Amino acid sequence: MIKYLGSKRALVGVLGAMADAAGARTAVDLFTGTTRVAQEFCRRGVRPLAVDTASYSLVLGQCYVEADAAAVDPTEVADALARLEALPPRRGYVTRVFCESARYFHPDNGARIDAIRDGIDDLYGDSTLRPILLTALLEAADRVDSTVGVQMAYLKSWAPRAGRPLQLRPPVLTPGTGEAVQADATEFVKTMPAVDLAYLDPPYNQHRYFTNYHVWETLVRWDAPEHYGVACKRVDARDPATRSAFNGRRTIHAALAETIARVPARVVVASFNDEGHVSVGELAEMCAPRGDEVRVLAFDSRRYVGSLIGIYNPSGVKVGQAGRRRNVEYLVLAGPGGLLDAMVDAAGADHLHESAIR
């Protein structure tokens, strides 16, 4: 999987165990990102809806959530990847923008990314393999990038991995199938079908995923956008339509409260941490009106690597210190008390932060 701010790698097993304890057979992952949680639901026999606004998230969902490992021929995938890897490198948009104007990738790898990305559309544009091949390219590029995991900047000196040759690997597909949906969560909950469990992991603060992962968005859309700034961000990042209410201190409360209230699920699990615009107490109060009970679990978590390096200006001069190394990740559960007790036991009762609000 690609490096991702807010990834729930450490909590995936806990969330899967809680879904089992709740007896869930259907679920929605409303801010799915890299689809890690939705994949875990698939592995446990739960059929998830993996929802996100990002184009790269849709492709990851089509690969890992919609495609069933049992129905995909691994030989066909391997042959397609070998065919793409054999394409001659070419200097295209990635090389010019992300290797020469910026420095996310070494130019040798950039030229290979350009050739492979064109090849996916030219050779497999109408194939069911397309999202699998795109995912393989995203993950291959991620393994040779020169960032700390977000694309608001690149490293002053090349990361050692950036000098390695790009290598396509077949994605490890999941059993079972769900559905990937590109949609805004606040609108989707108004018309979505009822599910057993809803998982919400919204943006916590002002950091926008559209700009944090603009390279992946461009690599999937393949629309050669105009760009600006040292980071060569997509110019449409300035468009208000690409901004989320969940990133604004003044707008997140109303957006999150409405989404929690509207989502048609028997059990709601909302994830947030202690660096967000919403406090855990406020999040619990948003869940309380659903009419059942509320539990809060707390997990100690390591902050993403970029937060440990410090802050640098465009000239590479350090202008700020690294922040704290740990934070607390909260899971707020709302639903029938008996189900919540079973879910808490599955997660580990030692993580219980507060008892039911009501």
Image (tube, rainbow, N blue to C red):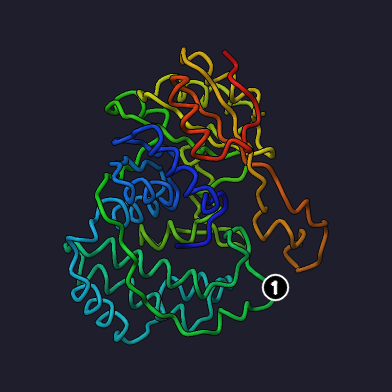
Vertical side of 168 occupied by 214: above or below: above
Q: Residue 307's spot in the image, x, y percent?
A: 71, 56
Residue 147 or 49: which is nearer the viewer?
Answer: 49
Give the structural element (helix, strand or loop) at label 1: loop
Residue 118 or 46: which is nearer the viewer?
Answer: 46
Q: Which image quadrant: the N terminus?
A: bottom left
- Residue sitting at x 52%, y 54%: 9
Asked if residue 73 lies left or right of residue 291, the reply is left
Q: Residue 271's spot in the image, x, y percent?
A: 54, 36
Vertical side of 157 occupied by 12: above or below: above
Q: Residue 46's spot in the image, x, y percent?
A: 30, 42
Crowd rating for badge 1 (residues with CA inside 10 Å; few <14, some 14–19, many 20+): some
Residue 95 or 345: which is nearer the viewer?
Answer: 345
Question: Which amino acid type is marked by label 1?
Answer: Lys
Q: Quadrant of residue 296?
A: top right
Q: Residue 327's spot in the image, x, y percent?
A: 70, 45
- Residue sitting at x 34%, y 36%: 27
Q: Which image quadrant: the C terminus?
A: top right
Residue for badge 1: 156
Vertical side of 6 occupied by 295: above or below: above
- Residue sitting at x 30%, y 51%: 65
